[in-house]
Amino acid sequence: RHIGTLPSQRHRGVGDRMKFGRVLALRAIPEWRESYVEYKRLKRLLYRLPDPKGGRDDDFSPAVSPEASLSSSASNLMPLSQPLLTGEYADVSLHFFAELEEGLARANELAAAQEETLVSRVQMASVDGQVLSPQELSSLYVLAAKLHSFLSLNFLAVRKIVKKYDKTVAIAGIPPRTPAMMARLEREPFAVARKQVDMLVKRLEGLVPPDGIPALRQAAKDALHISSGTDATTPRLLPLTLSLLSGLIAASLPLSAFADPDQRTAQRCLGVLVTVVGLWLTEALPFFVTALLVPVLIVVAGAVPPEHEAQLKPEIAKRVLNAMFNNVILLVLSGLVAARVVARCQLELRVAAALQRRLETRPRIFILAIMLLGLLLSATISNVTAPVLLLSVVQPLLHEGQTDSAFARALLLGLAFSCNLGGMLTPIASPQNAIALVSLQQVAGADVSFGLWMSVAMPVALLGTAACWLLLLVLIKPYDCVALPKVVFSEAPLTPQKVFSLSAVAAAAVLWAFLSFAPLKNTLGDPAIVGVLLAAVSFGSGFLHKDDFNALPWHLLALIAGGNALGLAVHESGLLEELVSLAFSTLDEESPWLLTVELVGGILVVGVFVSHTVAAIIIMPLVATIGVQMGQPVPLVFCCALACSAAMALPVSSFPNLNSLSAEDDLGGAYLRPAHFLLAGVPATLVAGVLVATVGYVLAVRMLDHLHA
């Protein structure tokens, strides 16, 4: 027995139930993700070739055994780049084999480097007599396991994709390429390295007593189980420790702002906030894991006060947990269901293909077009649902590019920023706008109509979108994409069931857009009710299935749930009120405009770290009160509401940011990191804030100030 028989390497059972592309994504080693043969991209290229008589059946992977026979009787080798088709399909064939050549080159390069490391270390131990510690032996064995997995999966990926090519072109009478490819693969460096790795594994096992071999194999199995599929979840101990210590210090230091005993809960909440933000910024833990820890930290630290003196810790814990799953979660869930319906009907592929055809040679203009779509959809169906639907439109293009592409980063950041700015446009575009309207009605007796709100917010949002687009061009430099890749898909007909499901999504979008009207609002109450109805129709009609429900991005919902719990703690502990009061004590009340500038700046800082909605709940009534005292409540509240949507410097600042952060490539690699949001998000937030405090303020004074009674 050797490493080739490890259960984690055989994939037995997994392949029998799952497409090979999914198997490859689950088994890929994260740190080597860029070096795998891009099986899914090659498969998409095949959709450009003529369909065989039998059609394209589902790609279910057989058992993936590293020791399976891959020999071939063919002897004549053809260069990969040789055109196999003529006429209109020749360029597709050339593109396919050029991509395959690049994939083989990447695999060979990594295999050669890792094999050299293994060989040199094992030779020093077995030939030169160097004694390896158990930890060093285990580390080398784990490296061999990972390399064996990498080599085997690439070998199988090439074999399967060339077989698919042969099947696709068989109708044209083209000779099969699989025999020649198998003969060539046996001589490729990464294929030869597989045999070398097997020998190295045996030599490593020979360096330990027989009873130590099972422990080595178990270590390799555990390492592959942890590493494969998505980013490794091993915690980074140093940033984890520093984040916890920072939170502990913030919660314990004798700060003058929290000198009153009644403010101890607020200071403990500050400690939790510092810890959570530190974990998110340093990525000491995966984002969703940090989000799941939020209620634990809140309850253990006592960051939420009891509602009455007799309330015990179990009841406080229930309040925190109940806050996690609220109407916002259900609205996001319904948006994800709508996106899945759209994807099942290939609507997003059709839209992406149409945009690609019109803007093929202008990728930077394509980014601007997506940002303008983000504005429009956010204004009509909210900036919670819009980014989910637009992400499904851009992902086909993202999958055709590289994960580390500056264009991909700029596109996703532009999508997030535009949906944030789109949250300014109408009273229904984001919850903070509705909160601002209620505050104006209750405190100032003023009511801003749908049309008036949009006419004032539109110039700010449009100018902000243009400014963010220019910032992305300067800071992210998305010039690595000369032309948009073609969106490749096999177009399926729109059946009556698909038309019905799309009609349900369209009806939900219309209800979301007009739910502010009294008859609808009195009937349905909340946009989440419309979303739940859409989910029930989509699954109840049989168009979507249980597997679709289980495949929803629950890690994204966990992130939002953690933010909800953190918002509850910041609200009920009095921390946000304390910070707001501290900020208000330094305000300049002589000039309404300077007061607006100060308030907008403070809201931007608060909105970066906590939910825009939570910030609006606490701040808007206070702003309205100050506005009444200054004689300009409507312009002041209006500008502060827009400022809530302008805060977008961190991934956790808003749902559109989290949505873009969740985008992944074919192998589960993330396109964006928190550093990318900081690089572009901080200046974007500042620019948007300046526009709110200048253009927004001037327009609000001229068009809305008369509404104050």
Image: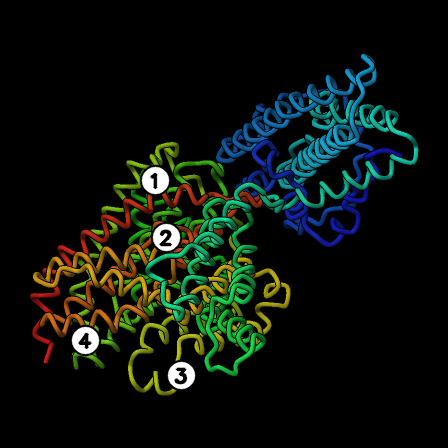
| Labels 4 and 2: the sequence-earlier one | 2
Q: Nearer the viewer, residue 646 or 471?
A: 646
Res 188 seen here: no
Closer to the eye: label 1 or 4? 4
| Labels 2 and 1: the sequence-earlier one | 1
- Image height check: is 129 above or below 330? above
Closer to the eye: label 2 or 1? 2
**Are discs 2 and 1 less than 8 Å apart at CB?**
no
- Residue under pointer 4: 449
- Give the quarter of the figure containing the C terminus: bottom left
Give the x, y percent position of residue 208: 87, 28
Res 618 seen here: yes
- Give the quarter of the figure containing the N terminus: top right
At mark 1, the secondary structure is: helix
- Residue under pointer 2: 416
| Mark 2 → mark 1, Cα distance in angstroms | 17 Å
- Image height check: is 360 above or below 509? above
| Residue at position x 42%, y 49% in the image | 394
| Mark 3 → mark 2, Cα distance in angstroms | 29 Å
Give the x, y percent position of residue 239: 52, 43
Q: Amino acid at mark 3?
A: Leu
- Number of other residues with Cα within 10 Å of mark 3, as a class: few under 14, some 14 to 19, many 20 or more: some
Q: How many marks?
A: 4
Q: Amino acid at mark 2?
A: Ala
At mark 4, the secondary structure is: loop
| Mark 4 → mark 3, Cα distance in angstroms | 21 Å
Say which quarter of the image contains residue 567.
bottom left
- Residue under pointer 3: 524
Q: In the displayed structure, does residue 634 sit left or right of residue 354?
A: left
- Residue under pointer 1: 363
